[in-house]
């Protein structure tokens, strides 16, 4: 998978974490700055900047302090079963949601705003995929739920119908559809 | 993962990260989904992570491997800037807006007029340009829609995941309601165009246009039509079937901006 500076494979993740635990956090800082900016940009979409007076650099610093606390207690919990940046994302979002929960609730902004950048990006023109090509690609996805979701979408089912057929709530259908799309895009990028 | 674990407490971040990547077993995935149903914190974490990961994937697919340039752009955004003319997507997909993509300015001008604030479009456009909300040939980001109203003393409220019923209530309460839609889905009438819109939606939903909702039409208790003003496409008011409207509106995750009152 492509990423900020191609530091994504598990051996690199191990190297970054191990270096930090050994007292050299330079790689981790570089990684946070170059590979995880999008996470902090996303957190900015909660409107923290306007309401709580923090910026992206503050957020990165904040998460570094969190990881570093008590001799890297939290960083040590990373089990390398996912990519480091995905895990860092969940840690960061949880931290900021907990930290700013009251402020966000008071301002009615517990939910993030619409992510325009994603929503306005169409892949179809870029890849110009025929129906059969879409089906072939969908069948290559490793996750069965991703395959099911995209097949339903291809057949024209709505989110509510997909939720019912998958036996999940509508809000979970939203999550699963997003994940399926994300994995599909990764797959298509890989096929290019 | 332990058998029969039901996640009455939040799953470990490692588990959530695996869920986000889609690498958990089906059974463990189901357990996480059960938890997400009743834990807004974890739900928001997963949702934000998926949306931002998707954003990152999109950036990668556009630029190949992003190098210093994309880092600079990210830094640029981190510094609070909103216009680099490259990475930042605007409402510039809308074929109805022709080349100027001024729907957001025009619609806000309509709303201002409703509050007896009459300002020529040219002036509002220039103001939006100077503030960095509008970019020539690219349009206005959804996050900037409403700022023109705020600048002229109109209080607004931005909401997503709204429903037709909430839309009806907002109209009844006298709020002026701007919604973001996929213009193609809203206004396309040929079967070929509709088919193309369906295919586009399969891959990504694109809210490329904003319109003003002025009311709803009902048959009994059922909302069957939405009355819309779209100064870019036509003069006056048109009513669109609710299912067509929902399809077009869904692309913005049912984004609604309510202009409430003069502050």
Image (spheres, rainbow, N blue to C red):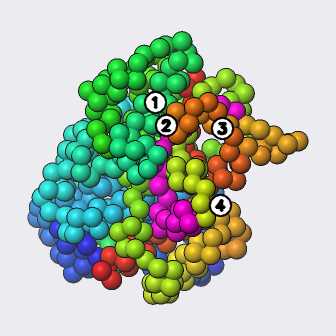
Viewer-nearest residue: A163 or A79:
A163
Check the picture and name the quadrant holding the C terminus of chain A: bottom left
Residue A18 against residue B134 in the figure, above or below: below
- Residue B105 percent coordinates (x, y): 42, 30
- Residue B1 percent coordinates (x, y): 51, 80
Can residue B5 be seen here? The reply is no
**Spatial separation of the CA atoms under disc 4 and disc 1:** 34 Å
**Spatial separation of the CA atoms under disc 2 and disc 4:** 34 Å
Q: Are marks 2 and 4 in contact (CB under 8 Å)?
A: no
Residue hosting label 3: B238
**Spatial separation of the CA atoms under disc 1 and disc 2:** 7 Å
**Spatial separation of the CA atoms under disc 3 and disc 1:** 17 Å
User: In the structure shown, which secondary structural element does the residue marked by tag 4 occupy?
Assistant: helix
- Please report, as a chain letter, where disc 4 is located: A
Point out which mark residue A170 bears: 4
- Same-chain status of marks 1 and 2: yes
Residue hosting label 2: B232
Task: Based on the picture, tell me whether residue A74 belongs to the magenta stretch.
Answer: no
Going from N to C along the chain, the mark reached first, 3 or 1, is 1
- Residue B166 percent coordinates (x, y): 69, 38
Going from N to C along the chain, the mark reached first, 3 or 2, is 2
- Same-chain status of marks 3 and 1: yes
Residue hosting label 1: B106
Q: Nearer the viewer, mark 1 or mark 2?
A: 2
- Same-chain status of marks 2 and 4: no
User: In the structure shown, which secondary structural element does the residue marked by tag 1 occupy?
Assistant: helix
């Amino acid at each position: 998978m492509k990423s900020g500076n191609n530091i994504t494979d598990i051996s690199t993740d191990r190297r970054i974490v191990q270096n930090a635990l050994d007292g050299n956090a330079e790689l981790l800082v570089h990684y946070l700055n170059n590979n995880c900016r999008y996470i902090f940009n996303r957190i900015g979409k909660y409107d923290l900047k306007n309401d709580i007076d923090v910026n992206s650099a503050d957020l990165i610093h904040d998460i570094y302090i969190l990881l570093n606390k008590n001799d890297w207690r939290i960083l040590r919990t990373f089990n390398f079963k996912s990519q480091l940046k995905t895990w860092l994302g969940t840690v960061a979002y949880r931290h900021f949601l907990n930290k700013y929960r009251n402020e966000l609730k008071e301002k009615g902004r517990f939910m993030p705003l619409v992510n325009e950048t994603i929503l306005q990006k169409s892949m179809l023109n870029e890849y110009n995929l025929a129906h059969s090509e879409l089906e072939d690609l969908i069948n290559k996805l490793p996750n069965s739920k991703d395959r099911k979701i995209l097949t339903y979408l291809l057949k024209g089912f709505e989110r509510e119908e997909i939720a019912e057929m998958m036996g999940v709530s509508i809000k979970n259908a939203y999550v699963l559809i997003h994940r399926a799309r994300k994995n599909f895009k990764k797959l298509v990028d890989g096929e290019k | 993962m332990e058998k029969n674990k039901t996640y009455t407490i939040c799953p470990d971040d490692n588990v959530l990260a695996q869920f986000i990547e889609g690498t958990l077993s089906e059974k463990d995935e189901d357990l996480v989904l059960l938890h997400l149903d009743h834990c807004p914190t974890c739900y928001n974490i997963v949702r934000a992570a998926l949306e931002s990961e998707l954003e990152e994937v999109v950036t990668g697919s556009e630029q190949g491997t992003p190098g210093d340039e994309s880092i600079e752009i990210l830094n640029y955004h981190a510094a609070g800037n909103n216009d680099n003319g490259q990475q930042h997507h605007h409402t510039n997909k809308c074929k109805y807006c022709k080349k100027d993509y001024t729907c957001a300015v025009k619609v806000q001008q309509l709303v201002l007029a409703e509050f007896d604030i009459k300002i020529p479009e040219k002036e509002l456009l220039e103001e939006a340009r100077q503030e960095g909300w509008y970019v020539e040939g690219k349009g206005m980001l959804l996050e900037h829609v409403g700022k023109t109203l705020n600048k002229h003393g109109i209080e607004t409220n931005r909401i997503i995941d709204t429903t037709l019923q909430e839309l009806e209530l907002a109209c009844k309460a006298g709020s002026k309601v701007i919604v973001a839609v996929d213009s193609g889905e809203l206004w396309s009438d040929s079967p070929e165009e509709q088919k193309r819109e369906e295919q586009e939606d399969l891959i990504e939903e694109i809210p490329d246009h904003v319109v003003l909702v002025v009311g709803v039409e009902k048959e009994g208790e059922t909302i069957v039509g939405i009355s819309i003003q779209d100064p870019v496409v036509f003069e006056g008011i048109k009513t669109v079937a609710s299912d067509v409207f929902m399809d077009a509106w869904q692309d913005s995750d049912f984004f609604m901006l309510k202009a409430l009152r003069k502050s």
